[in-house]
Image (spheres, rainbow, N blue to C red):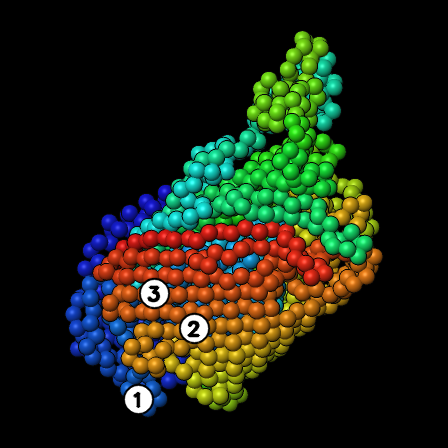
Amino acid sequence: MLNRILTLAVLLLVATTAFAQSGAVSGTVYDEDGFPMLGANVVIQGTTTGAQTDFIEGKFQFKADPGVYTIVASYVGYADQVVPDVEVIANETTVLDVNFSADGGGIELDMDITVKAKALERGEVAVMKIRQNDINAKDLISQQEISSLGASTAASALTKVTGTTVVDGKYVYVRGLGDRYSATTINGLRLPSIDPYRNSAQLDLIPTSILDNISASKTFTPDLPGDFTGGSVDIKIKALPERFTWGVSASAGYNGQSNLQDNFVTYDAGDGIGLGYNDGTLDRPAAVATYENSELAVFSSSAGRPARSDDELAAALDDVANDFGNGFTLNNKDSGLDYSLSANIGNQFNLGSMPVGVFATASVSQDYSQYNDGRRGNYVNPGDGGPLQEIYDVRDDKSTQAGKVGGMLGLSFKPSPSNNITLYGLYSHQGFTEGRILQGSNEDKGASGEADNFYRSQASTFLERELINYVAQGEHVLTNLGGTKIEWTANYVDSEQNEPDLRFAEYIQQGENFIIDPSQFQRPSRFFRDLSDDSYQGKLDITIPFLQKKSKANNFRFGGLYQTKERDFNENIYAYNNRSGISFSQAGGDFDVFLGPDNLGIIGGEPGSNVIGVHVFDNSNAANSYTGTFDVAGGYGMLTYEISERLKAVGGLRVEQTTILVESDVVGIERERDEPNQANIDDNTANIEETNLMPALNLIFKATESSNVRLGFSQTIARPNMREVAPFGSFGFLGEPPVFGNPDLKLTDINNFDLRYEVFPNPGEVIAFSAFYKQFTNPIVTTFRLAGEQQFTWTNSESADLYGVELEFRKSLAVLGESFQNFTFSSNFAYIQSNQEIDEREVQLGQEVDPNFSGERVFNGQSDFVANANLAFRTPETGWDAIIAYNYFSDRLQSIGAVGSPDIFEKGRSQLDISVSKQVNNFKFSLRGRNLLNPDFKTFSDFQGEEYIFSQYTRGVDLSLGVSYSL
């Protein structure tokens, strides 16, 4: 797909060179209340060159030869607006937004003819105007600010939005709520998750090069998805170009602990990993397909015994074992520099009288990350009133090489000023190759951690994620029906997450003995996991204006949404069993010897009396593979009515029907239904069918021309994902408890109360205060259970609460004097508290171990404090752009502790980034530093005043140089 995009880009470049010699004028015409004026005329004075604003957003655009002109905007019932000295420059777009006034007086104009000024008008000032007039309490970040911050993905950009945090570098949390409690959409349609354990979409899949802005709606209105609690994040894709444009960019990055290092831990994963692709090296061996349906018991753990006398079976074991081979040997290599490359091209031209826009972009990048001094531990409460008992404490060495490829191709056409249709395809692919070694003490397995008595585990992992999103959307204004607006969107998303050939082994070294004891350890194993989701969505919104003479804000809006997702998840595990070969200890702890050709399969004997060494058997649990469907059908009605000049009400009702069906691949698992803390399961199916009504009412009081007071109440829901209801357990590495789904989960009901006061002193500036309270019924929580062993699962607790406040400040520092006129300071702060009841059974079990075990805990991923502060310096006339960005979040719950043990928290940390860029004609040079404070990434538990570290490492400081060229 990337090759096709690049080919199209070259063709567009050749085909549109002629247009590059002209310029363009574009913008939006607004009335005195800030509403777009549909059908206004904008022309060059004394000519017929110009355009009429469209009937959708009040936008216009026309081409013109280079020169200086007087522009005239006219509309029936208003005095003409005349704008002199508008300069049109070749290869550039002059942005001209016109504001009519009721008395026909002058216009408010903040216009500059440069491309840099266009970014400003369509950036920070524009998003503030959107925010001020929107019916939702909404926070936005513009593409210009994203670019200044140097954010490369939607996930990293969202860390700068008020009240949002990002967990694990990709999952967004809004107001302390993530996963099931925060929805993510692209152009209004849900972005699916491709992680079986998460509801949240992976936002590191979305490159910022294709974004126009990102918004986070904090109050629910019925036209938004019903699983809205913390917030709804909508990613707006760039509009198609108004003129010919193309650009290329390149950057190189260096991190002192990751790049140009000669101890980067890796393994042979093929030649495609640089770009994040499996070239076939990591596919299941061909011998598996040859014998998996054979009548021979090739993959039985005990096949080595009958194979002694069964030559056909012995030959098959030999074939399979040698096809798998070793694969466990890790080695060191030299890591390179990080790099990224991107290109884009677009144009707008006329097909007859119909404007047509085309846009294509492609990107590729590679990134190395490594730490060699990490630490990992595990501790439990022994229940004797003393300190926590150490299970293991190991050194953690981890190296990850990431390759990313992405692209977008878009096509838009306007059959008439009142009709617009857009088609686009989005492609994103990522691959992560990881080598990891854990070594140290493991008291649970008898290893003290001393030089001659230690525990060691190692894993070789390749994780591949891919998202392909095909979208068609349209906007139509029916002028003969009073300006009724019809908006529709449909898409198909093909997403996959594959882990081909995850290799895991663990052992203990005691002096010269290397021990792999199947009674204590997972045998050396190869895991093959693949998840594929096919998602279809359709959305229709119809807006009918009424009483427009009273207020243009008055309208009735209704519509519907249907989305269906089909999932197929498969897991195959193949383990090594030593029948009569040399032991791992005899091999000196060397996997090249232990799993070498001389110790695999048939290693001696004669026909009819075969000696079988190490062979491979199928250790899969068929119940761990499943299929599922996830369907949501919804409809809504919503009224926006201006009660008075200052008071506006937005209210309505949404109804959604949820159907979730998950079937495991085998029947006959035992479970006692409706008792999720028991170990028994009695069937292989989870089925949820539920219909929910969700009312909402928002009041917007226009306190002054530049300030709003917003009040809101709504009811929303949260859903479990398919993995959480899937009736099976999954393997936990390094002694971690397995995770079991719960088919008896219910949906969560939430009441939301919101208050916001916001002031917009000047264009691009804001001061805002928000308060919120959320009340949960049947919240879905992670819990422990005892079923012969400790296990994780999910259950519904009775209730939970969350409340908090947000403060936001964005102001030009020009008020401090002329020397500060190019400086802008912005900051935001959130204080959040939550409380959820722990499952009653877990409380009983916990208090048996610790009488002080609490019956409450906070929401997972929720920080009490979140803060951002940015100081920006911009001089469009000289091309300098610099920003210092600071981000902080306080401790947040990462996972719950073992029964009776304290919960595990991620330590709060600060991040400081600096970005400086310089525009020189069409070139832009940039220097960026990220993570300059290089804090510890740490998880821990507090118990009896002592801190117990579960994981700790540093990422190092990232430095990068970049250059781009755009036309």
Return the residue at label 3.
882
Which of the marked residues, 1 or 2, is nearer the chain's N terminus? 1
Return the residue at label 2.
826
Q: Secondary structure at mark 1?
A: loop
Q: Are marks 2 and 3 in contact (CB under 8 Å)?
A: no
Snapshot quadrant of residue 71: bottom left
Amino acid beneath label 2: Ser
Is disc 1 surrounded by few (<14), some (14 to 19) or many (20+) residues within 10 Å?
Answer: few
Instruction: Decide if residue 773 is on the left or right side of residue 817.
Output: right
Instruction: Decide if residue 734 is on the left or right side of residue 242.
Output: right
Snapshot quadrant of residue 218: bottom right
Q: Secondary structure at mark 2?
A: strand
Q: Position of residue 938 (x, y in %)?
A: 58, 55
Q: Nearer the viewer, residue 507 or 403?
A: 507
Amino acid beneath label 1: Gly
Give the CA distance from mark 3 to mark 1: 40 Å
Amino acid beneath label 3: Ala
